[in-house]
Image (cartoon, rainbow, N blue to C red):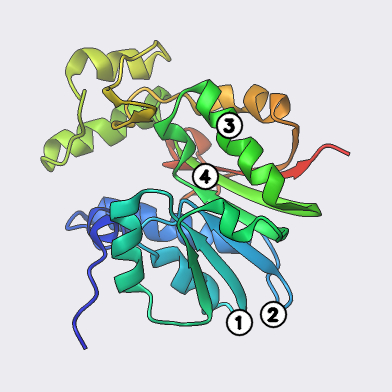
Amino acid sequence: MAKKKYIYSKLTTENSSFFKRFTHNKRFTKALSLTNLTKETKILDFGTGDGHFLNLIYNEDTSIVYGYEPIKEMFTQLQSNIDNKEIKLINHLDEVSNLKFDVVYCLEVLEHFYKDYQIYLLNQIKNQLAINGLVVVSVPIEVGIASFIKNTIRVAIQQFERDTNFKNMVKALFYRHVDRSTEGNYIFSHIGFNYKTLDKIFKEAGFTIVKKDFSPFKILRGLNSQVFYVLKMKQ
């Protein structure tokens, strides 16, 4: 069997940098810990990328698992990576228009879009969510002292992103707006993304925050790499 190619994983969970491997592996562990999954739980991974998380979900003794990836090139890679026929892969949400999911994961997606499109995506998720369903969202922390530490490490290991320069690093440190490179709706870089704006955006999209948590540390929240939200629809 040919070795599977997880392009995204090479940048995250299999990165040459210990720091990146540690934080990304911890965030997947954190995501799984935030809900109680059973064989009856209908699960959708929204924006699943190369499918790494799908295999982790299925290994948690679950059986109704769907992975949605809208980008055609990534979906083609996803198909070659997932050989478990019990995991359903979809490229369009109309393929599951008749299904409602108990848990929807949306990990490391929203930071790549501005507010209007974030709300659009959250409405798509809401349309697929069961009445008492939960949404688990994670985004990177790219402002404040955590951002300055992350960007300093990125520069040191020569894995910095687009738009990374000292001026933007200082702007992100002090929560100032950073102009990030875009193509259509998509924003390429993370630098300067302000996760604190999401509280209002979730509310505007019709969600209530059930829980907010951080990764990889339980303490020193200001030094964490990711923030997690567990959401439910407003009743």
Residue 72 visible (yes or no): yes
Which residue position is annotated with label 1? 61
User: What amino acid does circle 4 point to?
Assistant: Ser
Q: Which numbered mark, 1 or 3, is in the foreground of this view?
A: 3
Q: Are marks 1 and 4 in contact (CB under 8 Å)?
A: no
| Badge 2: residue crowd in 10 Å (few <14, some 14–19, many ≥20) | few
Q: Quadrant of residue 152?
A: top left
Report the quarter where the C terminus lies.
top right
Q: Quadrant of residue 101?
A: bottom right
| Badge 4: residue crowd in 10 Å (few <14, some 14–19, many ≥20) | many
Which residue position is annotated with label 3? 120
Q: Secondary structure at mark 4?
A: strand
Closer to the camera in the image, 78 or 10: 78
User: What amino acid does circle 2 point to?
Assistant: Lys
Disc 1 versus disc 3: distance between alpha carbons? 32 Å
Residue 138, label in figure:
4
Q: Are marks 2 and 3 in contact (CB under 8 Å)?
A: no
Which tag, 4 or 2, sits closer to the chain's start? 2
Which tag, 1 or 2, sits closer to the chain's start? 2
Closer to the camera in the image, 74 or 3: 74
Q: Is 162 left or right of 62, judged from the image as shown?
A: left
Disc 2 versus disc 3: distance between alpha carbons? 30 Å
Residue 230 visible (yes or no): no
Disc 4 versus disc 2: distance between alpha carbons? 24 Å
Q: Are marks 1 and 3 in contact (CB under 8 Å)?
A: no
Q: Is 18 left or right of 131, judged from the image as shown?
A: left
Residue 200 in the image: above or below residue 71: above
Which residue position is annotated with label 2? 39
Q: Is 209 left or right of 87, judged from the image as shown?
A: right
Q: Are marks 1 and 2 in contact (CB under 8 Å)?
A: yes
